[in-house]
C-alpha cells in the first residue's frame, strides 16, 4: 500500500531529522503516561491486593465494578474530569485545565481500575497457594497483601505495562482535558488526530508508527528486565 | 522438657469436634487430648480426615461443632507459639535467609536480631551456605528443610507437619526426619501426619489412627505396630484398607 | 534483593518528579478559545509567534467549533474567544459573557464537490441556486452538524435557498458532527458535496477527487470576531494580558501579520478590523 510506505518515509524523515517539535511531543507523551501509570500503580496495586486477600460484605460487587471500570471509555472520563477541573466546576480554582497535570490526572484515573482489577486477580490466584502458610505464620491480611505484591512483582510488571499501553494509546481523555494546545498539551495521539483531520494522512500514520515503535521498545525493555530477574529469583 | 514457658499452650483438648461440609462429615466427633512430650504421629487411609484434623488443631479451620481449646491460648495479634509445615514448602520469592527474617518480623523479633537468629536456624538444618540463594531455586529437599528452619527460628511449642516428605526422595526425606527429631529434642511438640508407615515407626512415640473421620485407635507406637487393637487398624497395617 | 527494591523505588520517584521538573512556573500565558479553521489552516502557527516575540505572552489555543468555543468561555475556561459566527457572538455579548466584539478578518466559504459534479452545479457563483439544485438532486452532502461557524453559515444558506433542511434531510444529507478536517475526510471518502472555509481547504492535503465548484457569492462571506471574556462574570480571566492580545490582533501590526499569511502564494484571511458593521 502506497500510503503505508509514504507513512514509513514520513516516520523516518521525522526521526532522522530529529525534529524538535517531534521530540517535544514524544517526551510529553512519555511524561504524561508514565507519571499516570506510576500514580495509578501506587493506588491500584494495594487496592487490588487488599481486595484479593480480604473478605467483606459486598466484595463480589466491588470486584465486578472494578472489572467493569476497565472498559471505561476515555472520552467519557475526559468529560467528567473536564467538568471537575473547569472554572465553573468544583476544582476550577486550581487552574489545572488544559495543563499536562490535568492529562496525568485523567489518565491515572483511567488506569487505576485496570491495575486494581488485574492485580486483584493475580494476587487472588497466588493467595490460594500462600494463604495457609502465611496465616500459620500469624501474618495479617494487610501484611499478606504487601508480601504478595512483592512476591508477584514480575507478574505485576506485565500489569503495569498493560496500564501504560492503555494510557499511551488513548486520545479521548487527553484531548478534552488537555485541549491539544500546540507546544503545551499536544501528545502523540492528539497530534495524530490533528494531522488526520488536516488530511495529512501519511504524516499521521508516520507519527503512529513512531508511537508504536516507542511502546514496543518500552515493552521489550521491561520484558528483558523481567526475564533476567525472574531467572535469578525463580 | 514439657514446659517451655510458665504459660504453655499444651495440653490441647478436643471435645467432640466435628467438621462438616455439606452432608459429608469429614471429622465425625473426635475427642482427645494432646500433651507435651511424645511425638504424635497421625496415620490412616485416604479421606480419613488427617489433614483436616491437623488444620483444625492449628486454627486454619474452624470446627462445625465441638470445642478445641489450648491450655493457655494465643491471643490475637500476639506472636504465634505454634507452627506448621506443609507437604509442599511455601516460600517467598526472596533469598533463603529473607524467608526466615520475614517470619521473624511477623513474630515481632526486633530488627537487629533477625539475621543472627535466621542464620542460626539455617545452621541447625545445614543450609547456612545457601543463605543468600533465592529460596525457589533450591532443591525440593532443601526447600522443605528451609521451611523447617523457618519454623524452628520461631521456637514454637508445637509443630504441625502435613506429610512433609511425601514429595521427596528417600535421601531428602531422611534429612527432614533428622531435623524433626532435632526440633523435638530441642523441646518442640511434634504432631505429624504421614502416609509413610516406616516413617511413622521411626518418628512416632504415639500413633493416632484415624478412619472415616473418627479416632479409631490411639496407642504408643511400638504397641500399635505390633498389636493393633481395632480391626480397622489391623487391616490398615496389612494394606487391606482401601486407599 | 535490596538492590532491586532500591532500583524500583528510585525509578518510581524519578518518574513522579518529571512533571515538576518541567513546569515553567508562572509563565505569562492566555487561553484563547478558537475554531478549528483558524488552527488547522496554520494561521495561528504563523501569527502567534509574532505576538509572543513582541509581548512575551504565550498564547494557548484550544481549537473547537464556534459553539463549543463560546460554551468553553461561558464556563470561564478561556480568556479570549476568536470565532466566526456573528449571531452566536452577539448572543454571547447579550448574555454579558463578553466585553466587546471587534471584527478581525474575513475569508470565504466555498462549495466543494466531486470533479464529476453529478448535480451539475459547477462553475456558478450563485450559492443559493446551487444548494437548491443539490437538494433537488438529493446529491450526497456532508454537514459539520457541530454548531460551528461553518455549520451555522450552512444552515443560514439552506434557509436563504428556501429549503427547510430539517424536513428535507434524508439519507443524502450526512450530519457528521465533526470538525472541518474530519468532515472533509468524510466527504472525500464518500465523494460528496460539502461547504468548507477556504483556509482549511487550501491547507487540506487529502483532497481525493474533490474540487471547488462554487465560490465568490457575497453570501459566502465569513467574518471572524474577537472578544475578551468578561472578567466581571469570570474573575479568573486574565484581563490585562487578554486585552493586549485583542488590541494587537486589530492593530495594524496584527492585521498585517494576518494578511501576510499565505499558502502556495494564496492569501487565506483578509483583515478588516476597521470595517464598520462587520
Image: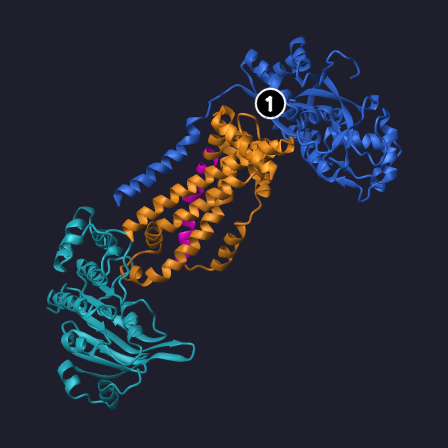
Chain colours: A orange, B cyan, C blue
Q: Which residue lies furthest to the top in this view?
A: C252
**What secondary structure is the stretch in magenta mostly built from?**
helix
Q: Residue at x 46, y 34 (%)?
A: A30
**Relative depth, front residue between C100 and C22:** C22
Q: In this view, does A186 lie above or below B108?
A: above
Q: Is residue A44 rendered magenta in the image?
A: yes
Which region is colored magenta?
A31-54
Q: In this view, does C6 lie to the left or right of C212?
A: left
Label 1, secondary structure: give it: loop
The C terminus of chain C: image quadrant: top right
Going 68% across and 16% down the picture, which residue do you hit? Answer: C265
Q: In this view, does A192 lie to the left or right of C14?
A: right
The reply to whether residue A83 is in sight is: no
Residue where numbered disc 1 is placed: C237
Instruction: Let me know if residue A41 appears in the view.
Output: yes
Disc 1: which chain? C
Amino acid at each position: 500500500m502506497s500510503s503505508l510506505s509514504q507513512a514509513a518515509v514520513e516516520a523516518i524523515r521525522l526521526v532522522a531529522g530529529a525534529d524538535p517539535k517531534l521530540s517535544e511531543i514524544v517526551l510529553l507523551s512519555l511524561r504524561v503516561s508514565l507519571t499516570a501509570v506510576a500514580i495509578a500503580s501506587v493506588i491500584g496495586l494495594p487496592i487490588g491486593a487488599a481486595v484479593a486477600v480480604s473478605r467483606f460484605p459486598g466484595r463480589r460487587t466491588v470486584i465486578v465494578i472494578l472489572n467493569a471500570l476497565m472498559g471505561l471509555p476515555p472520552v467519557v472520563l475526559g468529560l467528567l474530569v473536564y467538568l471537575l477541573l473547569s472554572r465553573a466546576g468544583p476544582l476550577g480554582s486550581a487552574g489545572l485545565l488544559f495543563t499536562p497535570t490535568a492529562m496525568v490526572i485523567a489518565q491515572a484515573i483511567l488506569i487505576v481500575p485496570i491495575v486494581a482489577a488485574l492485580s486483584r486477580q493475580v494476587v487472588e490466584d497466588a493467595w490460594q497457594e500462600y494463604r495457609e502458610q502465611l496465616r500459620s505464620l500469624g501474618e495479617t491480611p494487610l501484611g499478606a497483601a504487601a508480601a504478595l505484591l512483592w512476591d508477584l512483582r514480575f507478574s505485576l510488571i506485565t500489569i503495569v505495562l498493560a496500564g501504560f499501553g492503555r494510557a499511551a494509546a488513548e486520545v479521548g481523555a487527553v484531548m478534552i482535558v488537555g485541549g491539544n494546545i500546540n507546544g503545551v498539551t499536544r501528545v502523540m495521539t492528539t497530534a495524530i488526530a490533528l494531522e488526520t483531520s488536516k488530511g495529512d494522512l501519511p504524516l499521521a500514520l508516520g507519527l503512529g508508527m513512531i508511537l508504536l515503535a516507542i511502546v514496543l521498545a518500552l515493552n521489550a525493555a521491561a520484558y528483558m528486565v523481567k526475564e533476567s530477574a525472574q531467572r535469578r529469583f525463580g | 522438657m514439657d514446659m517451655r514457658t510458665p504459660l504453655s499452650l499444651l495440653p490441647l483438648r478436643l471435645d467432640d469436634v466435628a467438621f462438616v461440609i455439606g452432608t459429608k462429615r469429614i471429622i465425625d466427633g473426635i475427642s482427645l487430648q494432646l500433651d507435651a512430650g511424645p511425638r504424635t504421629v497421625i496415620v490412616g487411609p485416604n479421606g480419613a480426615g488427617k489433614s483436616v484434623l491437623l488444620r483444625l488443631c492449628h486454627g486454619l479451620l474452624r470446627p462445625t461443632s465441638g470445642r478445641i481449646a489450648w491450655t493457655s491460648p494465643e491471643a490475637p495479634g500476639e506472636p504465634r507459639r505454634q507452627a506448621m509445615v506443609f507437604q509442599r514448602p511455601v516460600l517467598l520469592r526472596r533469598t533463603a535467609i529473607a524467608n526466615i527474617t520475614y517470619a521473624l518480623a511477623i513474630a515481632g523479633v526486633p530488627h537487629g536480631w533477625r539475621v543472627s537468629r535466621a542464620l542460626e536456624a539455617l545452621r541447625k538444618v545445614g543450609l547456612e551456605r545457601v543463605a543468600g540463594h533465592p529460596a525457589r531455586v533450591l532443591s525440593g529437599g532443601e526447600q522443605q528443610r528451609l521451611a523447617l528452619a523457618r519454623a524452628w527460628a520461631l521456637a514454637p511449642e508445637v509443630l504441625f507437619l502435613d506429610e512433609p516428605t511425601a514429595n521427596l526422595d528417600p535421601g531428602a526425606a531422611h534429612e527432614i526426619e533428622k531435623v524433626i527429631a532435632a526440633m523435638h529434642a530441642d523441646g518442640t511438640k511434634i504432631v505429624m501426619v504421614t502416609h509413610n508407615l516406616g516413617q511413622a515407626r521411626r518418628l512416632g512415640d504415639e500413633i493416632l489412627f484415624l478412619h472415616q473421620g473418627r479416632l479409631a485407635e490411639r496407642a504408643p507406637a511400638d504397641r500399635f505396630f505390633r498389636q493393633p487393637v481395632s480391626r480397622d487398624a489391623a487391616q490398615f497395617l496389612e494394606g487391606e484398607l482401601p486407599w | 534483593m535490596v538492590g532491586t527494591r532500591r532500583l524500583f523505588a528510585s525509578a518510581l520517584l524519578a518518574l513522579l518528579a518529571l512533571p515538576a521538573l518541567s513546569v515553567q512556573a508562572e509563565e505569562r500565558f492566555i487561553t484563547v478559545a478558537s475554531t478549528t479553521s483558524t488552527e488547522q489552516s496554520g494561521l495561528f502557527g504563523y501569527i502567534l509567534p509574532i505576538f509572543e516575540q513582541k509581548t512575551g505572552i504565550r498564547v494557548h489555543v484550544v481549537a473547537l467549533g464556534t459553539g463549543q468555543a463560546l460554551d468553553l468561555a461561558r464556563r470561564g475556561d478561556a480568556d479570549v474567544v476568536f470565532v466566526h459566527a456573528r449571531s452566536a457572538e452577539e448572543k454571547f455579548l447579550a448574555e454579558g459573557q463578553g466585553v466587546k466584539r471587534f471584527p478581525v478578518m474575513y475569508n470565504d466559504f466555498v462549495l466543494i464537490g466531486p470533479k464529476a459534479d453529478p448535480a451539475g452545479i459547477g462553475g456558478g457563483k450563485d450559492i443559493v441556486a446551487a444548494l437548491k439544485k443539490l437538494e433537488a438532486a438529493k446529491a450526497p452532502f456532508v454537514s459539520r452538524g457541530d454548531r460551528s461557524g461553518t455549520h451555522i453559515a450552512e444552515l443560514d444558506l439552506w434557509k436563504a435557498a428556501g429549503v427547510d433542511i430539517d424536513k428535507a434531510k434524508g439519507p443524502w444529507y450526512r450530519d457528521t458532527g465533526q470538525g472541518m478536517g474530519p468532515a472533509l475526510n468524510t466527504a472525500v471518502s464518500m465523494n460528496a458535496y460539502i461547504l468548507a472555509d477556504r483556509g482549511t481547504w487550501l491547507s487540506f492535503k487529502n483532497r481525493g477527487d474533490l474540487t471547488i465548484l462554487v465560490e465568490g457569492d457575497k453570501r459566502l462571506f465569513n467574518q471572524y470576531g474577537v472578544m475578551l471574556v468578561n472578567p466581571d462574570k469570570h474573575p479568573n480571566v486574565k484581563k490585562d494580558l487578554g486585552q493586549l492580545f485583542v488590541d494587537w490582533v486589530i492593530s495594524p501590526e496584527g492585521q498585517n501579520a494576518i494578511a501576510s499569511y499565505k499558502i502556495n502564494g494564496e492569501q487565506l484571511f483578509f483583515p478588516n478590523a476597521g470595517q464598520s458593521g462587520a
